[in-house]
Each structure stands twice: as structure tokens, then as C-alpha cells.
Image: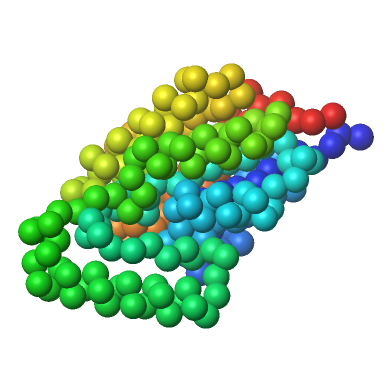
Amino acid sequence: MRKKPKILFLGDCNTLGTPEIQGHAYPEKLARHIDADILNCGHTMSTTREGLEYFKAKFDPSIDTICIQYGLVDSWQTFKYSPYVLYYPDSKRRKIGRKLTKKFKKLCKKLGLNKLIGTHNVVPLKEYIQNILTIMQKAGNCSIILIDTAPNKDKTRNQDIENYNLALSELAAQHATVFKLSIYKDFATTQQDHYIDPNHLSLEGHQFIADRLTKLIQADIPTHD
């Protein structure tokens, strides 16, 4: 009897799916396509920092493949000295901290400090790469699939997104058990609307990723015996 593949998904809101899509996002669609057991650890507003925490909490040696899709929030430009409060694991103290952080950033923007002092990415590219490398190094013999962040409808964000996607391509090229699912250009050129708003994917967008991921896994990804 064939063993079901076991796949861990680490990602942001476009891995989890918006509320009306949750349970029907691309990880769940993939599970139905290939008859896999999945654990969807997508989380709204999360970055590779949360990804490290999810990996520590959820990874076990029976997992065959880890799919990673971070970059939407990591690449976001924010006030250079704004603090960051994790979204996972969550607590009352962290919820209060995030509310205060949002107020602080709004005040800085109102005062023009963003332009005066400057901005940077929520998770700088060097740290983003290191966070993913840490997961890769601790995942043992797991296959890793790095998934592009789709282009944003706010085109001012897309140069940063492209830079983070390029880092994923370079990581995949350097490691034999790491694969890249490149979807950025497909989303940029499609005639279909794969979005429900500038940031979030529609059911059609999730289906597109699930179909592409299915082909990649069936062609290239081994499973444990």
C-alpha cells in the first residue's frame, strides 16, 4: 500500500487563505490532488520569523516535504526603527505590543519620520535568507519547495518582491534537495484575475498554485518509504 506523502506548509496569508477561502487554499487543494496528509501553518501577517517558530513546533521526522512561501510581509517597506512583534506564538502581551507598534508607525508616518529617517524591509533580505537556511539545515533529508511570492497589485512593492524571489531561486540552485516553484511571471502575465484585493489570492489563484505544485511534486519530489 502506497504511503501518503506528508507535507508541512509554512507561509503567510496566501498560504493560509483569506477567511472565506480557509480550508480551500492551495495546500488543501494539493492534498486532494495527490492524496497527501498536510499541515497548513500559514498565518496572517507572518514572516520567516514566525516560520522558524512554526518549524520548531510542528516539524517531525515523518514529514516528507516542506513547502515555504514567505515574502509578502518580509519584503514590505516599513519605518526603519519600528519594532517587530511576532504573530506566532501569540499571547495577550504580544497582541498589546502589536497594537502599540501600529500606533507608533502611524505616528511616525504622520510626522514624516519615514521620509526623514528612512525605511527598510520588515525582515531584511539577509535575515530572510538566513531564516530559510536555518529551516533547510534542520529539516534533515526533507525535500524543500520554495514558492514565489506573487506580484502585488500595488506595483510599487514588486521590485522588493522580485528581489526576495530571486533569493529563493539562488537557494534552490545551491541545494540538491531544494526546489523552486516559480509563479511570479505567470501571475504577472495572466489574463485571469487571481486576486481578491492587491495582496490576497482568489480561489482561482490558489487553484493555479495547487496545479503547478502538483506537477512539480509528481515529477521531482521523492517520498519516504
Residue at (62%, 40%) from the top-left corner? Answer: 66
Residue at (86%, 34%) from the top-left corner? Answer: 2
In the image, 154 versus 76, the foreground residue is 76
* Residue 183 appears in the rendering: no
Q: Is residue 108 above or below residue 118?
A: below
Q: Is residue 44 above or below residue 120?
A: below
Q: Is residue 222 above or below residue 23?
A: above
- Quarter placement of the C terminus: top right
The location of residue 24, given as percent across then percent down, is 58, 58
The location of residue 177, given as percent across then percent down, is 61, 24
Residue at (9%, 72%) from the top-left corner? Answer: 111
Asked if residue 31 lies left or right of residue 192, the reply is right
Asked if residue 65 lies left or right of residue 188, the reply is right
The location of residue 179, given as percent across then percent down, is 54, 27
* Residue 123 appears in the rendering: yes
- Quarter placement of the N terminus: top right
Residue at (39%, 46%) from the top-left corner? Answer: 71
Q: Is residue 210 above or below residue 171?
A: below
Name which quarter of the figure residue 134 lies in: top right
In the image, 115 versus 42, the foreground residue is 115
The location of residue 97, given as percent across then percent down, is 41, 75
